[in-house]
Image (spheres, helix red, strand yellow):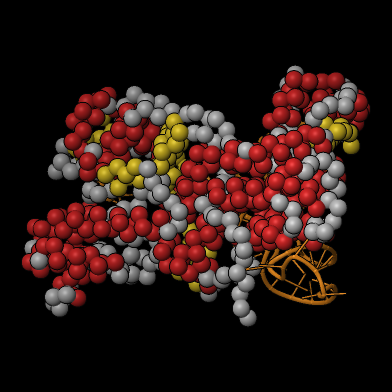
Amino acid sequence: MKQRVSALLREKFGREVVLEKPKDRAFGHFSTPIAFSLAKELRKSPMVIAEDLASSFNESEIFSSVESVKGYLNFRLSENFLSEYGDWALQNQSEFGKQDKKSKILLEFVSANPTGPLHIGHARGAVYGDTLYRLAKHLGYDITAEYYVNDAGNQIDLLGLSIALYARENILNESVEYPESYYRGEYLEGLANGALEKFGKEIFNDESRYKELALWAKDGVMDLVVASLADTNIHFDTFVNESSLYSDWDRVMQKMADGIYKKEEKIWIASEAKGDDNDRVVVREDGRPTYLAGDIVYHNQKFERGYDHYINIWGADHHGYIPRVNAAVEYLGYNSKKLETLLSQMVSLLKDGEPYKMSKRAGNVILMSDIVEEIGSDALRFIFASKKSDTALEFDLSEFKKQDSSNPIFYIQYAHARIQTILSKSNFSKEDIMASSLKGLNENADSLLFDALLLPEIIEDAFSSRQVQKLPDYLKSLAASLHKFYYDCRIIGTDDEAKLLKLLFVVALSLKTGLSLLGIEAKDRMAKEEE
RNA sequence: GCGCUCUUAGCUCAGCUGGAUAGAGCAAUGCCCUUCUAAGGCAUAGGCCAAUGGUUCGAAUCCAUUAGGGCGUACCA
C-alpha cells in the first residue's frame, strides 16, 4: 500500500518522498512534510507550496482526496483502492504480506553452550532470532536458522566433572569436595543416571574418562535444549558442532596466513590492524586453541557455504568480540560487511523489587522451560518480542507469573476470538460474505479496514530494520481498533451485516498472520477464567 | 582509564531515515453489560523526553560536553 503510494509520488515529484502516518486519522491515511523541504529551494512558504501541490492532484484511482493542512500534504486513499486490496487479500490469504526476496541468509542464534538447559536469559535471543526468521521467510528470503554447538573447550570438561561430582555425592553417596567452578542443577540427575547405565559407576571416579562422559552427556543436554525450544515453537534447520570444525584447522590457518603470526610460542591474529583494541591469541603455547579459534573456523565455513548475508545474534556481553571476528573474516578474504552481528541485551531479573542474581554455581537459575510452564509460550514470546532487543530489560519475576489482562497477548487473542464469535453467530454463509463488497462502509469501518491492510508494510519494516517489536506494537493497535469498533458498531442484524463481516475477515486475517509470525497461534475462543 | 550502550508518566516500555497537540499497557479515580464473551469501551489524572550548549524553518530524535546506570576491556566460553 505504502509502496504504491510512495512510488506514485516519486514519479510525480521526481524525488524520494517521506511518507508518514498522520497523528490523527482525520488528516488522512498518509501524509508528507515535503513542502517544508521544498520551501528553501522554491523560496516560498510551505503553506503555499502545499496548497499548490494539493491542487495539482486530480481524481485518481488511488486517492480520494489530497489536502494541504498547515504545510502538510495529506492523502486519503480511495474506497476503490482499499476495497480491491482487501478483496485481493481475502482471496490470497496465504500470500498476504508476502514478498519475493530471493537472497540467501544464514541466521545464527541461541548457540548456548551444551552444558545445561536454557535459562531465561537465553530466551530473549531465542525469541528475537526466531521472529526474525519467521519474518524473513514470509518475505521470501531463503533463510537458514543455525545453532552453533560449542562442544569443545573448558566448559565441556567442566560438564564431565560436574556430572561425576553429582553422581559421586548422590548416587555413590561419597562425600565430595567441590572445586571453584562446576555446574549444578536438576538436569544433572538425569544425566548421571543415564551415565551410570551406559558406562557403569567406575567412570565417576576415573578422571581420565571425564571427557568421554562429557561428550556423551552433551547430546543429552542438547536434547533438553531442543525440547525447550520446541515448546516455544522455535526450530533450527542446522546444528554445527565446534568439535567437527578443527579437522579444517590447518587449511584455514593457511588461508589467513597474512593475518596471523607467531610470538612467545603462541599464534596471534593481527586484529588490531583491523580495528580491534589488541591482537588476540588464537592458539596457546601448549597448542590448545582459544575460543576465538573455533569461531574463526566456523565463520570460514559459513562463508564457504556461500550465503548472500550472515546474521549473528549474540548476547550483549559478547559485543567486544565483534571486531575480532570481523577481522578474521577480512583476513580470510571475505567482506565483513556481509556479516551482521545483532546484540540481544541482558535480561536483568527482579524478585519482589530486589535484583535477583542467577548463577549456575548456586543452582538458582530460572529455566526457560519453567517460565513456559508458568505463563505459556505465547505470553513469553510476546513479551520478549515486544521489547526492542538492544535495550536492557528488567523483569520482575512475580509480574512474570501473572496470567491476566496485564498481559497484552490476551488483548490481541481476544480481538481475534471476538471476530470468530460474531462470525459463528451470523446467518450469512462464507460465500455470501465473500461475495459482498467492502465499499460503502462507514467511516469507522473504513478506518479499520485500512489498519488491517497495513500489516504487509509492518512486516517489511520490522525485518529490514531488525526491530521486531514493531509487529507486536502494530497488532496491539489493530486489536484496539477492533475492540473499539466492536463497542461502537453493532454488526449482526444490521443492513450492512455481510460487508461488515467481510471487513472482520480482513482484520482476522491480519491478526492471525501477524501472530503466526510471532510464533503464536490465534485463538478462536477465549476460555474465561472461573471466579 | 578506554570502548560500546542506555536514561521518555509512579512501574514496564513504544515513538520509523528530524516534522502537526509526546504515546500504550499496568497501577489510580469515575462512568458504560435486558445488546455479537466486560480478558472490552469511554473519561480524568499523571511529562522541563537526565542536564547544558549547538545545528535547523522545526529536535525526544542529529552533534558536543556533563552526570548517572549497564556491558565489555581474558591465552573463560
Could you tell me residue A140's position as x and y percent?
52, 34
Q: Taking the image as drawn, is residue A358 in sight? A: no
Residue lying at 51% horizontally and 52% vertically, measured from the top left:
A519
Q: Report the front residue among A504 and A254.
A: A504
Image check: A66 left or right of A133? Answer: right
Q: Residue at x 25, y 67 (%)?
A: A190
| The image quarter in which residue A60 lies | top right
Residue at position x 10%, y 68% from top? A201
Residue A161: x %, y % from top left: 18, 62
Question: Measured along the vertical axis of the image, is residue A482 above or below residue A463?
Answer: below
What percent of the width, then of the height, locates residue A138?
A: 54, 39
Give left or right: position of A292 versus A311. left
The residue sitting at 47% across, 46% down in the picture is A129
Residue A410, how many percent across, how many down? 62, 63
Note whether A229 is above or below A138 in the view shown: below
Q: Nearer the viewer, residue A448 or A356?
A: A448
Q: Looking at the rendering, in which quadrant would you find the N terminus of chain A?
A: top right
> Would residue A17 be seen by someone viewing this image from the given angle?
yes
**A39 displayed left or right of A505:** right
Q: Say which quarter of the image contains residue A494.
A: bottom right
**Front position in the image: A426 or A307:** A426
